[in-house]
Amino acid sequence: MKKVLITGSQGQLGKAINEYYQDDCRYELINTDVAELDITDEKKVMDMICKCQPDVIINCAAHTQVDACEHDKERAYLINAIGPKNLSLAANKVGAVIVHLSSDYVFDGEKKVPYIEGDKYDPQSVYGETKLAGEELVRAIAEKYFVIRTAWLYGEGKNFVNTMLKLAETREIIKVVKDQYGTPTSAEEVVKVIDLLIGSTEYGTYHATCEGSCSWYEFTQKIFELCGKKTQIIPVTTQEYGAEAKRPLYSVLENRMLKEKFNYSMANWEKALEKYLKDRNLMKKEKQYSMKKKVLVTGANGYIGRHVVSALLEQGHEVLASDFAFDGVDERAKYIDTPIFSGDEDIYEQLGKPDVCIHLAWRNGFVHNAETHLLDLPNHYTFIKNMIKGGLPQLSVMGTMHEVGYWEGAITEDTPTNPTSLYGIAKNALRQMTYLLASGTETKVDWLRAYYILGDDKKSNSLFAKIVGWEEEGKETFPFNSGKNKYDFIGVDELACQIATAATQDEIYGVINCCTGKPVALADKVEEFITEHGFKIRPEFGAFPDRPYDSPGVWGDAEKITKIMGADK
């Protein structure tokens, strides 16, 4: 059993470490806080470390009151820089590994795209300066170290989440900064990274924040949404808010080293927040999902499939993930590489006899006039036919707004279809064939229509994926049409949750629009996307003429999905 000494054990991260390892026989935890160990006292640190002989030292102690650091630079430097130096010297003495926690404040927030571990430092506050000094001393002195930068941390104790919820109890209006972007990060998720690193010898500097990003204003919106708070949130600028110390406007960190050395991805910030709130019974009402089912997802490693698999698992279902490769699929699922288009009549049994099949598999979904849409259609037909003949109870097939063709206004399940692309023609034909195949059988069928999907943009081939690429290439502008056309935009995680819920419920069937039901102008969405990511690139509106065959406004009728998701609350 290895000994792990923790400094700052009463802080958010220290408490999370203790909770994570409470039943773990691999490590013996030695908890210290300022009362037991003043890390600014070199002699006391050396004496304590030599007495305890730890294998690992995790330094969670820090002066984190950003504005207070501006008034007491000496104390901030002692705790944030001299403390880590003392611990590094003592770690060398006993041959221990030191894990030192640092901050996004070592950067200036001007880069506008996520910071990686090797980017130039330029702290803008005393807090940032002293945290950087601590990092540099650890790297210069410690023989075996992990420097871990995280950001917007919340855990057990005083943090932004708990502060907002407390304010919501007594205030009708709260002002929150809208122009600072970062990544809310659960302390529990950071501990998982610590556990990964101390089990290795891949020493160095790592970023460890949850995936995704948002502003403080958007973070607060999500907290209140999940907790059912009605307090009004007023977005204000950093200047209007008037904090004393300068904050980085864009401090999103990319966990590049974790991915390159360990192929490890942290949880999405929204999912981590939901788990944090759920674990503490702070959500407005626990979600009541339908009973656990065995769900087969075809195309599980696709753009949508990976998110659907995770959504189903979060809802407590057993998931059979079917695809050719599984590098992006949640490891909690059972992987199935049996070819679904083999034509075998017993394919239902080969695929594990699921209660539900969510059929997402489809080639070239972003290439609307690829011949494969029609060439693959017989394979889809045969697969669905044999699954139904095998006794499949529930089938949900992914459809698309492109089945409808040109349309102005809301698309309902009764909207006539007149597709104008090979993709739309093939999907429309498969929908008609699927209902014909299921007619007279016990199989219940859902046809789930998707609209304009956002998120996970590097995995897609959408306009927004191209904007990300152009920004990374350093382009300043890109040509665009007027952007006046309105569409139904939905985040891929929200879409996945709708698909998972609709496919496993037992009350509402037929054509179901997976959408928001809210039309938004493309120009507004593009501007929002650029601002949200802190990009510099700008659209040249009007550089291209609007296409005459594009609808001025088309969106999904959300009546059915609203009922389904409402029943799920």
Image: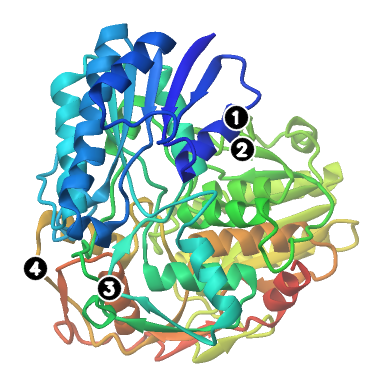
Residue 541, percent from left and from top = 18, 84
- Mark 2 touching mark 1, by CB under 8 A? yes
Q: Amino acid at mark 3?
A: Asp
Disc with the residue nearer the chain's start (1 vs 4): 1
Quarter residue 516 falls in:
bottom right
Residue under the point 77% across and 62% down: 445
Residue annotated with mark 3:
179
Q: Secondary structure at mark 2?
A: strand
Residue annotated with mark 4:
476
Q: Secondary structure at mark 1?
A: loop
Residue 309, percent from left and from top = 61, 46
Residue annotated with mark 2:
322
Disc with the residue nearer the chain's start (2 vs 4): 2
Q: Amino acid at mark 1?
A: Asp
Q: Secondary structure at mark 3?
A: loop
Q: Nearer the viewer, mark 1 or mark 4?
A: 4
Residue under the point 45% across and 52% down: 372
Q: Amino acid at mark 4?
A: Glu
Quarter residue 251 falls in:
bottom left
Q: Is residue 156 left or right of residue 176?
A: right
As measured in the structure, the alpha-carbon distance from the residue carrying label 3 to the one carrying label 1 is 46 Å
Q: Nearer the viewer, mark 3 or mark 1?
A: 3
| Nearer the observer, 164 or 422 | 164
- Mark 2 touching mark 4, by CB under 8 A? no
As measured in the structure, the alpha-carbon distance from the residue carrying label 3 to the one carrying label 4 is 21 Å
Label 1: few (<14), some or many (≥20) within 10 Å? Answer: few
Q: Secondary structure at mark 4?
A: loop
